[in-house]
């Protein structure tokens, strides 16, 4: 049967394709065999599907567009087939690769066009600044530790003392086979007990709120005019000579202007308040002599004057939008107050605010030429004092710097006699070219040199660490050797600074001792020198040793092998201990024999830094014979802490911590010594016994299991310690002995003992 199909007329399809005459089949002989297959669509639009006509992938489709109809194909980004989606994904991948390649080319071109910075003490940080933006560079991780009342952890860099404590704790945990928390090596401070200077615990209120007049102090908490004068005079005798950011004459005139009504409180002043707070913090420490104990309370001398500190901050909040030089002065003094109170993170935050405020008023720039010389030099001293404080804090915490040395910074402050005379303080001239301002200049130069070395060391270790395949840099002796080789070049700048320090700023030594050295000679303190000069000499040398400890300490490696002694970094680890011993020797003599540094919180923190470094070196050292001087220095450090502990609890707590660490270190070293002695004894005994018996068995002596065989076995087993005996039992359990040689009166000559673990000795 035949079926007749009726086609759709051409006029209804809208197609322009030729239709052969009716009744004639299309000719196949004229078709092009290479003609492309008709493009198909995954799904026709609604109208084309109803009409059963060919649709396309255009939006709208060709049929709807020609008839001006509303096409259902509206989503231009919609892919209706899996091949279409794959092709689009591949196209986008190629596009991303092209864009990334163009971006890399742009970065390379921009870095190539950067001008080479001039050679300076900050050349390492400026020259390698672009490397910090490399996304593929691996970071040298620090450590997150909780150092305050809250359990919230904060980050400290790999060159900080807290990172060193974390490494030491890891080693103690492994050696003692029990957990050892980082908080066990943190002195008790106000910051660990209270969350603010108001001595409020978490969950309590925010303390006293400011009144409408801006005060946060009641009338009973304010000092009288006589009491304030006492503490203000104490400031000029203590902090002023080492931190010359105030003009004494102008400050005293400002104070007199605040007492307008006799018998009543003075007008509020943020600068006067913070100076009184610092003086009370220092003065109450040197007046407290009968204090004992390691617990901190609200009466701790380190937070004396906190109400004046709070009122200073409340008054400073009014100047945030229009800061002045007085604002920066208050912020610098606030940082020192917080550091002495052990609120390190609050101090760091305030320090960042001080740097930004100084930038707002242009202290980092050279003062205008028409400005009076007195004010010009004061602005320079304020900026460089802020720079020193920020650099020392960031190096101590291991965090990035907020300031960077550049060509637009102002010149270093002058220290000539005319400048010293106009600074507002009446100090005796020291030498032809040395004044009371020379200490501040030498202090600044020292910080600049150490900061450049610190930056170069971090950059070098980071570069080497990024080149390695993985792991910790301390586990790779070759990487540490490369760091030590690079460090030997940059450290020369510090030795040059020592040679340029004026002799008048050096404390003499008894005998053939040399200042700014590590020969541990006794100090010859000048008896009739003014107190401020004696303190300047000591602070400069102690700061030198403290910063040197920070530079050399990263080369102390906690390892259970003898690789440390073979490493080139061992000499720098030894130098860290030598500077720690030198600092401790100076502190012990000065604290126990004089009152020059009594109540000086920064000196206590330097001693803590040195003591922890000495304990870490003692723990990491593999030779007990060379650590006797280190142990003696640690005992002196404990004595220094005990003297400071009569004034504030943090020092007494530090003494207890160091004593506990020394006991644990002695236990670890003694156990290691006994283990090594047993290993050497066992090795010698087992080697002799096994060689004799194996030789006898090899020659078929026949007495291995003879009448004396039991004695031979007892002698061998007595020479094996418990560790090797356990290992032998594991081998015997895994590899049962074939005792067939005992049959037929065999003498055991074919018994192979080479697989037993103790024969390897």
Image (cartoon, helix red, strand yellow):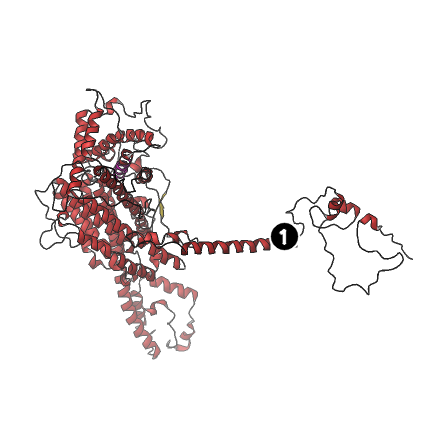
For image coordinates 16% across by 26% down, the residue present is 226
User: Residue reaching furthest left?
Assistant: 528
Q: Where does the image place residue 198, in percent across and percent down from the top left?
A: 30, 31
For residue 395, above or below residue 569 = above
Query: Relative to residue 16, is residue 320 drawn left or right?
Result: left
User: Quick one: quadrant of the C terminus?
Assistant: bottom left
For image coordinates 74% across by 42% down, the residue present is 69
Residue 142 on the magenta span: no
Query: Relative to residue 459, is residue 540 drawn left or right?
Result: left
Magenta part of the protein: which range?
Answer: 331-341
Q: Where does the image place residue 264, in percent across and percent down from the top left?
A: 22, 20
For image coordinates 21% across by 23% down, the residue present is 259
Residue 334 on the magenta span: yes
Q: In this orientation, which residue lies closer to the viewer: 666 or 573?
A: 573
User: Residue reaching furthest bottom?
Assistant: 699
Q: How many C-alpha atoms fall within 10 Å of the one at disc 1: few (<14), some, or many (≥20)?
A: few
For residue 760, above or below residue 57 = below
Q: Where does the image place residue 176, in percent across and percent down from the top left?
A: 31, 52
Q: In this orientation, which residue lies closer to the viewer: 337 or 44?
A: 44
For residue 760, above or below residue 699 = above
Q: Where does the image place residue 652, in percent across and percent down from the top left?
A: 22, 40
User: Quick one: quadrant of the N terminus?
Assistant: bottom right
Can the viewer see residue 597 in this picture?
no
User: Residue reaching furthest right?
Assistant: 1
Which secondary structure is most common in the magenta stretch?
Answer: helix
- The residue indicated by pointer 1 is 85
Q: In this orientation, which residue lies closer to the viewer: 689 or 320?
A: 320
Query: For the image shown, how many numbered marks are present on the structure?
Result: 1
Can the viewer see residue 301 in this picture?
yes
Mark 1, secondary structure of its residue: helix
């Amino acid at each position: 049967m035949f079926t007749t199909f009726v086609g759709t007329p051409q006029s209804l399809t809208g197609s322009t394709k030729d239709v052969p005459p009716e009744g004639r089949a299309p000719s196949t002989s004229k078709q092009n065999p290479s003609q492309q297959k008709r493009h198909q669509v995954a799904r026709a639009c609604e109208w084309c599907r109803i009409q059963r006509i060919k649709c396309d992938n255009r939006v709208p489709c060709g049929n709807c567009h020609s008839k001006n109809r509303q096409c259902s194909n509206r989503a231009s980004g919609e892919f209706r087939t899996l091949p279409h989606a794959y092709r689009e994904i591949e196209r986008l991948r190629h596009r991303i690769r092209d864009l990334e390649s163009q971006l890399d080319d742009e970065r390379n071109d921009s870095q190539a066009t950067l001008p080479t910075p001039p050679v300076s003490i900050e050349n390492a940080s400026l020259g390698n600044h672009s490397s910090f933006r490399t996304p593929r560079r691996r970071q040298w991780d620090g450590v997150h530790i909780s150092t305050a009342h809250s359990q919230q952890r904060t980050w400290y860099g790999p060159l900080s003392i807290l990172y060193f404590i974390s490494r030491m704790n890891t080693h103690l945990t492994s050696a003692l086979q029990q957990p050892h928390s980082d908080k066990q090596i943190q002195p008790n401070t106000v910051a660990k007990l209270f969350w603010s200077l108001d001595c409020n615990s978490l969950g309590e209120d925010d303390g006293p709120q400011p009144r409408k007049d801006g005060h946060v102090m009641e009338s009973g908490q304010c000092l009288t005019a006589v009491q304030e004068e006492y503490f203000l005079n104490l400031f000029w005798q203590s902090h002023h000579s080492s931190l010359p950011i105030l003009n004494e004459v102008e400050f005293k005139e400002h104070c007199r202007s605040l007492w307008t009504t006799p018998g009543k409180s003075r007008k509020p002043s943020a600068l006067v308040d913070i100076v009184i707070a610092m003086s009370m913090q220092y003065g109450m420490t040197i007046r407290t002599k009968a204090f004992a104990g390691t617990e901190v309370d609200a009466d701790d001398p380190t937070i004396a004057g906190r109400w004046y500190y709070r009122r200073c901050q409340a008054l400073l909040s009014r100047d945030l939008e229009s800061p002045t030089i007085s604002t920066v002065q208050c912020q610098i003094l606030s940082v020192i107050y917080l550091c002495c109170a052990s609120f390190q993170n609050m101090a760091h935050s305030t320090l960042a605010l001080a740097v930004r405020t100084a930038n707002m008023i242009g202290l980092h720039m050279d003062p205008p030429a028409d400005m009076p010389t007195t004010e010009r030099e004061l602005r320079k001293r304020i900026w460089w004092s802020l720079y020193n404080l920020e650099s020392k804090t960031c190096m101590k915490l291991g965090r990035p710097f907020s300031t960077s040395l550049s060509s637009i910074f102002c010149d270093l402050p002058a220290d000539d006699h005319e400048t010293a005379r106009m600074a507002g303080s009446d100090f005796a001239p020291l030498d032809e070219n040395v004044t009371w301002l020379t200490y501040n200049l030498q202090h600044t130069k020292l910080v600049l040199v150490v900061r450049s070395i610190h930056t170069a060391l971090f950059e070098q270790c980071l570069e080497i660490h990024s080149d390695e395949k993985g792991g910790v840099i301390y586990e790779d002796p070759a990487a540490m050797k490369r760091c030590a080789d690079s460090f030997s070049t940059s450290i020369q700048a510090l030795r040059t600074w020592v040679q340029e320090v004026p002799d008048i700023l050096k404390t003499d030594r008894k005998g053939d001792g040399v200042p700014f050295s590590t020969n541990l000679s006794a100090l010859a303190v000048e008896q009739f020198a003014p107190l401020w000069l004696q303190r300047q000499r000591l602070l400069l040398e102690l700061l030198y040793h403290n910063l040197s400890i920070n530079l050399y300490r990263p080369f102390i490696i906690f390892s259970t092998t003898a690789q440390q002694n073979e490493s080139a970094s061992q000499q720098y680890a030894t130098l860290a201990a030598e500077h720690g011993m030198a600092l401790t020797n100076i502190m012990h003599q000065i604290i126990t024999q004089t009152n020059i540094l009594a109540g000086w919180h920064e000196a206590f923190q330097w001693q803590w830094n040195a003591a922890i470094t000495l304990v870490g070196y003692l723990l990491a050292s593999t030779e007990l014979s060379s650590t006797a001087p280190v142990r003696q220095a640690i005992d002196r450090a404990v004595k220094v802490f005990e003297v400071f502990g009569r004034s504030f609890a943090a020092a007494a707590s530090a003494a207890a911590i160091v004593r506990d660490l020394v006991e644990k270190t002695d236990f670890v070293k003694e156990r290691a010594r006994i283990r090594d002695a047993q290993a050497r004894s066992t090795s010698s005994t087992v080697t002799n016994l096994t060689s004799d018996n194996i030789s006898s068995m090899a020659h078929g002596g026949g007495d291995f299991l003879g009448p004396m065989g039991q004695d031979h076995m007892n002698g061998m087993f007595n020479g094996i310690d418990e560790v090797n005996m356990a290992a032998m039992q594991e081998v015997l359990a895994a590899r049962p002995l074939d005792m067939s040689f005992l049959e037929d009166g065999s003498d055991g000559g074919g018994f192979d003992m080479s697989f037993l673990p103790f024969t390897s000795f």
